[in-house]
């Protein structure tokens, strides 16, 4: 194989594809990037058997071929090459020569036959959505994905196509995030995508008006974004009937300014950390919200003036869980709905129903 690349295009492709490469594996090929020429372009792929990323970039192909190169080593080299073009050449012994300007490297590659095949699957469903919208939906819900591997079903987000809407749902037992968006589809279908795969979609740079083509099979899904395809295994199992966990009605309703309440909770959080967990006590009474926090370090209190409807309530929250919901709301104002001190707080937008966040309270003593 002999092929020439634009260094900048190659560096970007290698950086993105490398994120799907295994860092420590008994199979050496999984620590590499597959490079394969095809006409006037080259395909690059990384795959750790859980997630795969594939892309194609323009190339001047002098001699067709394919090779696996160490992802970390090749990435470090490409980033530091001095010229705008890079020539890559391999011989029949898998020795790879990399030339750019005054710089030359000679490294040992691996046979492409050792690279595992990227997932191929029978398509069950497919749909399209704007990339920016999908990323926003993932961003607003991924904070509630569980990292508890004893319940793997919740280490991903539920994608639910229902009645012309896409719902993305994450839950970890302490909070739940639901993001809803109308899309052009009439199918009813659901699948669960691991959190790691969703984080890779967020990291991928794309045009503001690009479209994601989502293709779903029985055990895998593929997200096609511009010239990239992200392959993901799906999590098998039954997701909780989340709609039944959302409290109906509200004993207490109030409207808050997002920045104001977030700042107040952050001030309470100065006295807490992972080793000193103490609830932020929230009291809705009179003409506002009183906040208190007591730890071995000291005490703090704050106050946010507002009006509310319904009953007075005193309730406690883990400061991090409450802040995660507030910081992912992305609206200037929010609706808080309470149903007593032991039921989850429901956080909603003032207008519409694009998201619902639940935060489970901590028992106060």
Image: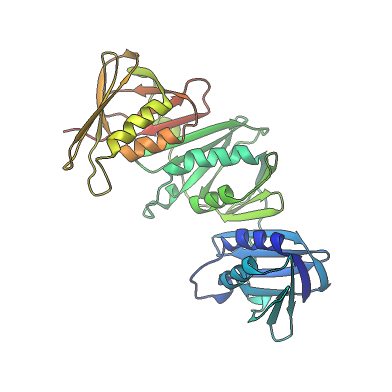
Residue 90's image quarter? bottom right
The residue at the far bottom in this view is 93
| Residue 360 seen in the figure | no
> In the image, residue 190 lies at what x, y percent?
56, 41
Residue 113's image quarter? bottom right
Q: Nearer the viewer, residue 124 or 210?
A: 210
Residue 243's image quarter? top left
Q: Is residue 96 above or below residue 142?
A: below
> In the image, residue 22 lies at what x, y percent?
53, 67
Please identify the quadrant where the N terminus is shown. Answer: bottom right
Number of residue marks: 0
> In the image, residue 345 lies at what x, y percent?
35, 28
Q: Residue at x 25, y 35 (%)?
A: 362
Q: Is residue 298 above or below residue 193?
A: above
> In the image, residue 271 lies at what x, y percent?
24, 40
Question: Is 37 situated left or right of 228 in this image?
Answer: right
Question: Is 84 situated left or right of 149 in this image?
Answer: right
Q: Nearer the viewer, residue 125 or 65?
A: 65
Q: Residue at x 59, y 52 (%)?
A: 218
Colour treatment of the image: rainbow
Q: Residue at x 74, y 78 (%)?
A: 89
Question: Is 209 situated left or right of 46 in this image?
Answer: right
Please identify the quadrant where the C terminus is shown. Answer: top left
């Amino acid at each position: 194989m002999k092929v020439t690349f634009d260094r900048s295009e190659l560096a970007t492709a290698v950086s993105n594809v490398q994120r799907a490469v295994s860092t420590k594996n008994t199979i050496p090929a999984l620590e590499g990037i597959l490079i394969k020429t095809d006409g006037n372009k080259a395909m690059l792929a990384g795959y750790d058997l859980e997630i795969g990323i594939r892309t194609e970039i323009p190339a001047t192909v002098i001699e067709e071929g394919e090779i696996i190169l160490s992802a970390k080593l090749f990435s470090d080299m490409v980033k530091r090459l001095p010229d705008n073009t890079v020539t890559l050449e391999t011989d029949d012994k898998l020795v790879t020569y990399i030339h750019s300007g005054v710089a030359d490297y000679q490294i040992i590659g691996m046979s492409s036959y050792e690279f595992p095949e990227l997932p191929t699957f029978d398509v069950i469903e497919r749909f399209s959505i704007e990339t920016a919208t999908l990323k926003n939906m993932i961003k607003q819900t991924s904070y509630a994905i569980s990292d508890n591997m004893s319940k793997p079903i919740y280490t991903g987000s539920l994608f639910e196509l229902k009645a012309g809407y896409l719902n993305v749902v994450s839950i970890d037992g302490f909070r739940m995030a639901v993001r809803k968006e109308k899309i052009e589809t009439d199918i009813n279908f659901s699948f669960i995508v691991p959190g790691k795969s969703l984080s890779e979609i967020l990291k991928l740079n794309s045009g503001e008006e690009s479209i994601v083509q989502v293709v779903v099979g029985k055990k895998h899904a593929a997200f096609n974004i511009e010239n990239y395809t992200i392959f993901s295994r799906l999590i098998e199992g039954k997701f909780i009937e989340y709609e039944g966990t959302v409290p109906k009605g509200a004993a207490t309703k109030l409207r808050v300014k997002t920045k104001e309440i977030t700042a107040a909770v952050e001030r309470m959080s100065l006295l807490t950390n992972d080793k000193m967990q103490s609830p932020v006590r929230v009291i809705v009474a009179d003409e506002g919200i009183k906040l208190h926090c007591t730890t071995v370090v000291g005490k703090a209190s704050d106050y946010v003036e507002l009006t509310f409807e319904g009953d007075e309530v005193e309730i406690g929250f883990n400061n991090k869980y409450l802040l995660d919901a507030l910081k992912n709301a992305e609206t200037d104002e929010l609706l808080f709905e309470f149903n007593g001190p032991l039921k989850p707080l429901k956080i909603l937008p003032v207008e519409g129903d694009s998201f619902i966040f639940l935060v489970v309270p901590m028992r106060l003593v």
